[in-house]
Image: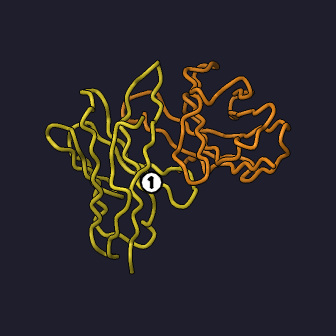
Amino acid sequence: EPEVTQTPSHQVTQMGQEVILRCVPISNHLYFYWYRQILGQKVEFLVSFYNNEISEKSEIFDDQFSVERPDGSNFTLKIRSTKLEDSAMYFCASRNPSGRQETQYFGPGTRLLVL
Amino acid sequence: DAKTTQPPSMDCAEGRAANLPCNHSTISGNEYVYWYRQIHSQGPQYIIHGLKNNETNEMASLIITEDRKSSTLILPHATLRDTAVYYCIVRGFTSGTYKYIFGTGTRLKVLA
């Protein structure tokens, strides 16, 4: 069964450093999402992406964040200058555009720790 | 804010049915109810979804009340592996996207 994959599974970085989190969505999906979950808190929407542009972003997704689909398979989240409060699990999700296939499927997540 | 309310926790004996309720009294006519679960800190796992009819798949059944203001997820024979946080999500189309707004979910503990 196809699934969303994410790399790395864990990332430790120093405050102020740039990180890139990578996702490979399910191959025939066209909509892509990033969510995050700070330890012990709710899963929060960050951004949605379709047709090579951002469809919607939350207030969390400020200028330090960017997303890109550099090729036909990868979808990346970049944090330009990490802050301590960026420490969280980051989940990528993807979905198909039509009918009952509009369900979002989530990857296993990347645990980001900013020191 | 999430459009759903769920009890924070529930226990269920292994082998018994787990019935997880969800209230979504402000749901609109074209909004679907989705259920996901999260085991430890893994990615949310899709379980089932519905609009107004009851639904069943290999994992669970979803019962939606006639007025659509509440629903129940049923795991017919809970196992220890079903211990997880279960999220009920009302998915609507806002600002051009189908984002999910997660609540705090129900922490289900299946007891041996």
Q: Which residue is mark 1?
A: B37
Chain B colour in the picture: yellow
Chain A colour in the picture: orange
Residue A39 horizontal/vertical position (percent): 61, 53
| Left or right of A113, for residue A59 | left
| Left or right of B74, for residue B67 | left
Q: Amino acid at mark 1?
A: Arg
Identify the residue at horizontal 74%, vertical 27% (top origin). A64
Looking at the image, residue B100 lies above or below residue A53 = below
Instruction: Evaluate whether residue B11 shows in this view.
Output: yes
Question: Hey, which residue is sitting farthest front in the picture?
Answer: A84
| Left or right of A86, for residue B33 | left
Residue A61 horizontal/vertical position (percent): 64, 28
Q: Residues within 10 Å of mark 1 (few under 14, many from 20)?
A: many
Residue in the foreground of this view, choosing between A73 and A33: A33
Looking at the image, residue B91 lies above or below residue B87 = above
Q: Label 1 is found on which chain of the structure?
A: B
Identify the residue at horizontal 66%, vertical 47% (top origin). A88
Q: Secondary structure at mark 1?
A: strand
Instruction: Evaluate whether residue A26 shows in this view.
Output: no
Residue A36 horizontal/vertical position (percent): 60, 42
Identify the residue at horizontal 20%, vertical 41% (top origin). B53
Identify the residue at horizontal 44%, vertical 54% (top origin). B37
Residue A81 horizontal/vertical position (percent): 81, 33
